[in-house]
Image: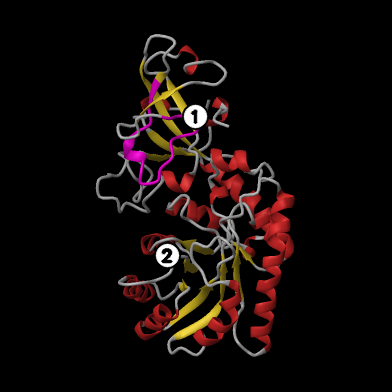
Amino acid sequence: MNKINDNLYTFEGQQDIVSPQLVYYPAIIRENIRKMIDIAGGPARLWPHIKTHKMAEVVQMQIEAGIDRFKCATIAEAEMAAKAGAKHLTLAYPLVGPNIKRFAALQTAFPEVEFFAIGDDTEQIRKLGQTCKANVLMDVDMGQHRTGVPLDKVEAMYREWNTLPGIVMRGMHCYDGHRHESSVQEREAATAPVDKQIEEIKARLKADGICCEILIMGGTPSFPVHAEMTGEFLSPGTCVIQDAGYRKAYPDLKFTPAAALLTRVVSRAPAPQPRHLHTGSGLQGRGHRSPAGARGDRGHGVCPHRDPERGALGGACAGRAHRRHPAHRDRAVCHPDSRLPHQRPVPGGPGGGKRQGHRLVEGRCA
């Protein structure tokens, strides 16, 4: 799925842009947001993750569409989203060590924002309550076995946490990142029994007067399933930008990739050797995957590339521009706002917080 519709992703002035650049297309992003809202049945049910894009501009596009709740992976992402105008923010990573004090400071810095912490360890939650008053969502292991309280221990621990000083229990964070079934019917069959258990736990807690008003369910592959099975909050993320990997893996999710790596051929090796694309090590972070269709020397950002239909880049000469979709977006963009010290604002770019190698372009002009 590495082919790109050049008519959709070509834009006026691209000949003057230094490559590599990760280019975002706001018109496509807005359309993906509209589709996400349609699936959810309205913006009020959405609690989308921002780790995929880490951009204030994209947060603001979602706010303009009526979404005011967001999920963040880091304190820095939460700070960026708060500055962008988010009203409710969940830090979707267990707080330990100095991050407990950083979370307390975040609440003080943005008193107009309602923050939520998650966790799966009683002692860390106790420390959080000793540091500040905090809204807490219990992180539930939905079967991924990465973080979260096992389902058979959720109810008892929830009741215990509800007695801890400084802790205000508000609900549960139920991320099922292991739901990778390509068939939506298989996703539904795997999701239904776990959702049923969660809803039963919530009902018992509420019957005893314990607050459990918020359930944040799923990720991009599973949120349409949760949307049909429950009335709870939904937490897609990748679909706002979309990428080549998800487009191929989940054909039922009709989202369009809204970012493309603009790159150029830097070497024209004699046939039948592949031409070389400069993909840019400056855009790559730990865990990064090359753009779909590109493999090679990531350390120098130079990848030999063959077009599966036209051979080695279709006989392209050095300097020819190409665009490729990243295989997985949240691994290709590693830092929110302008916090990465070795990157500088793009000259003439759209405001603060832009990184070198990232550019928003409005619409398509060619």
Task: Give the residue at mark 2.
Answer: 82
Task: Give the residue at mark 1.
Answer: 293
State the image coordinates of residue 312 (x, y, percent, origin top left).
47, 16
- How many neighbours does mark 1 have within 10 angstroms: few (below 14), some (14-19), or many (20 or more)? some
Residue 78 in the image: above or below residue 264: below
State the image coordinates of residue 234 (x, y, percent, origin top left).
62, 62
Magenta span: predominant SS is: loop
Camera-side residue: 162 or 256?
Answer: 162
Residue at image point 32% right, 75% down = 101
- How many neighbours does mark 2 have within 10 angstroms: few (below 14), some (14-19), or many (20 or more)? many
User: Magenta includes 50?
Assistant: no
Q: Is residue 229 visible?
A: yes
* Amino acid type, label 2: Ala
State the image coordinates of residue 105 (x, y, percent, origin top left).
33, 74
Residue occupying the far top of the picture: 270
Residue occupying the far left of the picture: 342
For the N terminus, the image quarter is top right
**Horizontal side of residue 112 vs 309, given as left or right:** left
Identify the magenta region: 276-295
Q: Under tag 2, what secondary structure?
A: helix
**Mark 2 and 1 residues: CB-CB less than 8 Å, in contact?**
no
The image's colour scheme reads: secondary structure
